[in-house]
Image: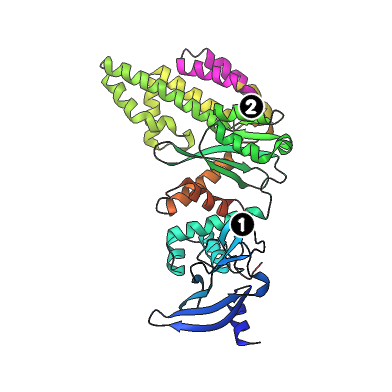
Amino acid sequence: MRQTRVWARGLGLCGAVVEGVDLELPTNTLVVLARVGWRDRDRCGICRRRCPGFDLGRGRRRWRTLDLGSSVTVLEADSPRVSCPEHGVVVAWVPWARHGSRFTRTFEEQAAWLTVHSAQSTVATLLRVTWGSIVGIASRVVAAAELGRDPFAHLEKIGIDEISWKKGQRYITVVVDHDSGRLVWAAPGRDQATLNRFFDALGEERCRKVRRVSRDGGSWIVNVVTRRCPRAIQCTDPYHVVSWATDALDQVRRAVWNQARRAGEIELAHELKGARWALWHNPEDLTDRQQATLDALARLNRPLYRAYILKESLRLVFHMGRRRALKELERWLTWARRSRLQPFVKLARTITAYRPSIEAALRYRISNALAESINQKIRLIIRRSYGFRSADAIIAMAKLSLGGLCPPLPDRS
Ligand SMILES: [Zn+2]
């Protein structure tokens, strides 16, 4: 094999015609001098259509590629511009790199794979790139992978949820596929317009094929799903229903506490202050001390203790078998309505309004647990990278890791 072909193949530089190799001192940078083969010349960088040449652009240009041994390796080539009838004057296409990137494809694929499989600091140090560069690479790799496949194929059971990524009401809406367990769609925002964009992308025909939708009780989701997928069965996530009960319990606790303070009942006020966590936790997770607090409450304040039992009973309903759960939910509602605890009377009304979708969740055993777990992983991605500056960067990283879009390592399948 000729020396130049050995270099092109060895460095994974598909489509490059290597003209020479040089070593730059003192940086120890290996420079691979290359050009585009005649078949790939004069093509638009965006659509790859063959176009008339325009000018030499900014002359020679460098792309970072995989290191050779311990040397930073770059590919250097001309970077002329062409005049595309559709895209105007653009930098000509090169077969070894994506349009607008300073890295070769092999470099980007390796970086993307490493980002998914190891810590951010490891990737940045090993590849000698900044975190900003890695985010850019992830966006390009995801965009390219999405072009090659249909993320919405065979979508029948979806989960919709939101995640807050920054203080001050910055949210991302996420859609997951219950069958593949993957993240299929995400966009900045948490409102009807955002979610409508998902269903627009899905298209009317595929909206009809969606059979189940798990979600929390957010009215913005309910309204959009009802309108766009009228035939889908909506399932209200049991976990969220229990969290409503926890909120109701807290309202009772605060009311009792305020009353106790005003009435000068020092012992009760004191117990209530420490009771928050005891009331929150599932009984099986309570420490001895929290259990003692609860026992004291049972003695000191019946209404609050009743509220606690109501919350706990509702949680247990969702752990029962389907038939028993449906029956017990009915009994729970009757109990809550007659509880004389205003927050629980109100909760009974809410649950009654959501009842068909709560029962559907019990019947089909479909919860938002998958969406929650994907959100948990997105939170981990956010924590691992010292603060993303944009929702788009988080979405690219999340899709790369959780959307099944991570490429294999270069030259492996
Ligand atoms: Zn073009």
Q: Is residue 2 magenta?
A: no
- The disc, 2 or 1, on the residue closer to the chain's N-terminal end is 1
User: Where does the magenta region start and end?
Assistant: 330-357
Look at mark 1 in the image and give the residue it sits on.
144
Residue at (68, 27) in percent of width and height: 323
Which residue is depicted at the point 56% across and 59% down?
Answer: 89
The spot of residue 186 in percent (x, y) is 56, 43
Quarter of the picture containing the C terminus is bottom right
Check the image and report above or below for 187 versus 337: below
* Quarter location, residue 195: top right
Main SS, magenta residues: helix
* Total count of labels: 2
Q: In the rendered structure, are the residues bearing label 2 and label 1 in contact, judged by CB atoms less than 8 Å apart?
A: no
The reply to whether residue 142 is visible in this rendering is yes
> At which x and y percent is residue 79?
54, 69
Task: Report how far apart the C-alphas of labels 2 and 1 lie in the structure.
Answer: 38 Å
Task: Look at the image and tell me in which quarter the N terminus lies.
Answer: bottom right
Q: Quadrant of residue 16?
A: bottom right
